[in-house]
Image (cartoon, rainbow, N blue to C red):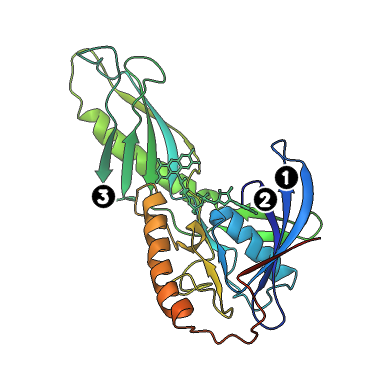
Amino acid sequence: MPLHIVTAISELPRHGYRVRCNEINDRGEVIQSKTFTSRYLFLAAGSMGTSKLLLKAKEKGTLPRLKPSVGQNWNNNGDMVSQRSNLPKPVIGKGGSSGAVVENINNTQNPISLMNLEDWFGGPGTQRCLTLAMTKPKGFFTYDRSTDDIKLHWPEQENTDALLAAKVTYTTLDGSINTPTTTPKSDINVSICAHPLGGAVMGKVCDQYGRVLNYQGLYVVDGALIPGPTACTNPSFTIAAIAERCMEKIIAEDIHNKRYALQRNDHSQFVAARG
Ligand SMILES: Cc1cc2nc3c(=O)[nH]c(=O)nc-3n(C[C@H](O)[C@H](O)[C@H](O)COP(=O)(O)OP(=O)(O)OC[C@H]3O[C@@H](n4cnc5c(N)ncnc54)[C@H](O)[C@@H]3O)c2cc1C
């Protein structure tokens, strides 16, 4: 439902889940609070959103049997933004380079992909790239009771290692451009994160089909499930493919075959109650 922000999830006494949310307007103001109950609950709020809901639920005791790894094994997918300059000017037209991906899997420090963006952000002879490395899933969230919010912790060393590895690849690339008039130069700018992954990962918090361990009918089908970087690529296709794989299995086994015996029969699929 658009303009509905889930604030809390909990289990029902016999079977199913309760979802509390705030309906907001397009200025972000809360119009009303609502509660939904459901037999099955699929979390698809992304690595940040799902990790937050699950960690809060564990810490506040509304889903107490979640595995201790909830909120852990997070990573930034090795994202960096880099600026190249002093490149040979384009021969034809006034546009920039076409988009391309350069993979350096033989980088001894860390495999690296460079994705050069099509625009000439800094004018002719420059190029901005998204750079991706294989960072380890060493990030984790903690819950702060005083603010009722979560905080992300990410070791700076992971960024440092990725930036060093990127430097190796850029140096190789720059050295291979041989013109008498230009000396290409690459400045590795900053580590960023447009691709958060992990927090409820398969094998630790969920099984390999997104079924949350210790909770029947509760599922994670988003980036929170991914247990590491997506191999030097941006991750949305990997997330979507894994979510589809989960859904095929869950529909066939859990829902059609009623894998989880229902302990109550008074449950319509969704029951909404305003409160
Ligand atoms: C600027 C930018 C550019 C990107 N470009 C690419 C690209 O080119 N290629 C690529 O593969 N990936 C790209 N990505 C990454 C990609 O968007 C994500 O990896 C992917 O969308 C994650 O999918 P997801 O299903 O895990 O979560 P999301 O797609 O983030 O979906 C989560 C949804 O849940 C909602 N939500 C969160 N919390 C709550 C809550 N409490 N209540 C209700 N709703 C909630 C969010 O609003 C969102 O709609 C980009 C990301 C950014 C930020």
Question: Which circle's residue, 2 or 3, is located before the other in the chain?
Answer: 2
Q: Residue 106 carries which label?
A: none
Dot 1 amino acid type:
Ile
Quadrant housing residue 264: bottom right
Q: Which of marks 2 and 3 is in front?
A: 2
Distance between mark 2 and mark 3 Cα atoms: 43 Å
Residue holding disc 2 = 4
Quadrant housing residue 244: bottom left
What SS does tag 1 mark? strand
What SS does tag 3 mark? loop
Residue holding disc 3 = 105
Asked whether mark 2 and ligand 1 are closer than 8 Å, the reply comes as: yes
Residue count near mark 2 (Cα–Cα under 10 Å), binned few <14, some 14–19, many ≥20 = some
Which residue occupies the foreground of this view, 6 or 177?
Answer: 6
User: Is residue 42 visible in this depiction of the protein?
Assistant: yes
Dot 2 amino acid type:
His
- Residue pictured at 65% horizontal, 77% vertical: 267
x and y percentages locating residue 273 in the rendered image: 75, 63
x and y percentages locating residue 25 in the rendered image: 72, 40
- Residue pictured at 49% horizontal, 43% vertical: 194
Which residue occupies the foreground of this view, 67 or 190?
Answer: 67
- Quadrant housing the C terminus: bottom right
Distance between mark 3 and mark 1 Cα atoms: 46 Å
Residue holding disc 1 = 24
